[in-house]
Amino acid sequence: MNLRIAWRNIWRNKKRSFITISSVILAVVLSTFTRSFQEGSYELMIENAIGKFSGYVQVHQKDYWEDKTLDNGIDVSDSLIKQILATPGVEGVNIRIESFSLASNKNNTKGTLVMGIEPAKEDSLIDLSRKIIKGKYFNDKDKGILIGSKLAQYLELDVNDSLVLMGQGHWGNTAVGIFPVKGIVKMPAPNIDRQIVFMPLKTARAYFSFPDGATSLVVKFKDADLTQQICKSLNARLDTSMYKAMTWQKMSPEMLQQIQSDRISGIMMLGILYMIIAFGIFGTVLMMTEERRREFAMMVAVGMQKSKLSIVTLYEAFIMNSLGIIIGIALSIPLVVYYHYYPIEMSGEMAKSIEKFGIEPVLPTMISFKIIFNQALTVLIITIVAAAYPVWSIFKLNVIKGLRR
């Protein structure tokens, strides 16, 4: 009976109910949208710089990360690769050899990161062939190279031009070579795009005088949430006196700190949004309570107990808030999905300032049920707290004064 009365009360004044439900819908949509954009930007940052470049877990020679030289590289053996592949969850291993070299063309010179890769395997990891904006992708037997678009622009290079590279090879050998530019790639992270030179692994080993060598083994697996678990399993399997598995959090602590500090500021901004939402919802509840004060007094005057009237009012709040949250979730999902696949592209000075941090200047959302659920739950808590006001008003109600309104 209380539920039936509450349901009828809601639709007795459709305008008032519509305002209340709309405030809850707006709260859910705004909070979900804001949080999805925050987490989406972190996800993009990690994916661009980690997932689609360095990988979430790498295996190195134990001293390599403290002293990143070719002399601390790995002699890759079949037994080492088999050990890594035998780890549960691991789907593949990419062999890489990388070091810095001086690149020159005409009067232009720039320090570059030369990365020797297995073309087919790297393409499956970082979609390198799809990032080519000019020229063609290479294969294992090619002598040509791929270079970042910003590097090509700085060095005034085009496809089929030659690039001179000079650096230090294995055990102090001089690494010098002239390589034809086979393609120009557009890397998502601008700081990588400014300095990257890709070579087929065989060509890079010859350039660095390191025939069976590698500086890192990128471990491939599908679920990024398994990063810590797989790294721990690898270190348990491998000979840690020779090798060491590392997670991206240890390899890129600056990025982790940047995300954590930015997340804190994001949560503070979200807290301000929640305060605005709370005041908006409470203002709506306050308006509704004041409008119904005479109605409440009349109900009590004709014999309805204040406790029962309070329960009916709570039911009304629960029904309207539940409707608002359900509709808010239903509206949030398509918006979040759309902006995940079609992110907002920034331009002008804002885009340039973001690119300085090595982040692609786009704003995608993150598709996560957890985000939607958490925002809906937070809004529900706010509405429950706000619903306490009408109950308090009913118990404090002066019937005589209420009837005179």
Image: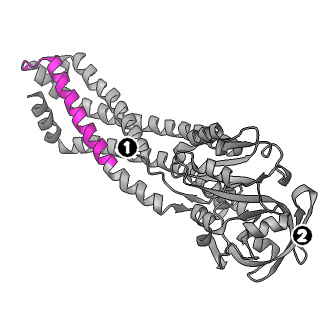
**Residue 51 vs residue 109: left or right?**
left
Q: What kind of element bears circle 2?
A: strand
Residue 176 at least partly seen: yes
Q: Quadrant of the C terminus?
A: top left
- Boundaries of the magenta span: 302-329
For disc 1, the marked residue is 28
Instruction: Tell me the quarter of the picture where residue 399 sits.
Output: top left
- Mark 2 crowdedness (10 Å alpha carbons): few <14, some 14-19, many ≥20: some
- The amino acid type found where label 2 is placed reads Val
**Extreme front residue here?**
79
Instruction: Tell me the quarter of the picture where residue 321 sits.
Output: top left
Mark 1 touching mark 2, by CB under 8 A? Answer: no
Could you say where residue 210 lies in the image, as x and y percent from the top left? 82, 61
Q: In terms of depth relative to the viewer, which is nearer, 7 or 284? A: 7
Q: In terms of depth relative to the viewer, which is nearer, 78 or 216? A: 78
Q: In terms of depth relative to the viewer, which is nearer, 227 or 273? A: 227
- Mark 1 crowdedness (10 Å alpha carbons): few <14, some 14-19, many ≥20: many
Q: Residue at x 52, y 61 (%)?
A: 344
Could you say where residue 236 lies in the image, as x and y percent from the top left? 63, 37
Could you say where residue 56 lies in the image, as x and y percent from the top left? 61, 49
For disc 2, the marked residue is 176
- Whether residue 315 is in magenta: the answer is yes
Q: Residue at x 67, y 40 (%)?
A: 257
Dominant SS in magenta: helix
- The amino acid type found where label 1 is placed reads Val
Q: Residue at x 30, y 33 (%)?
A: 285
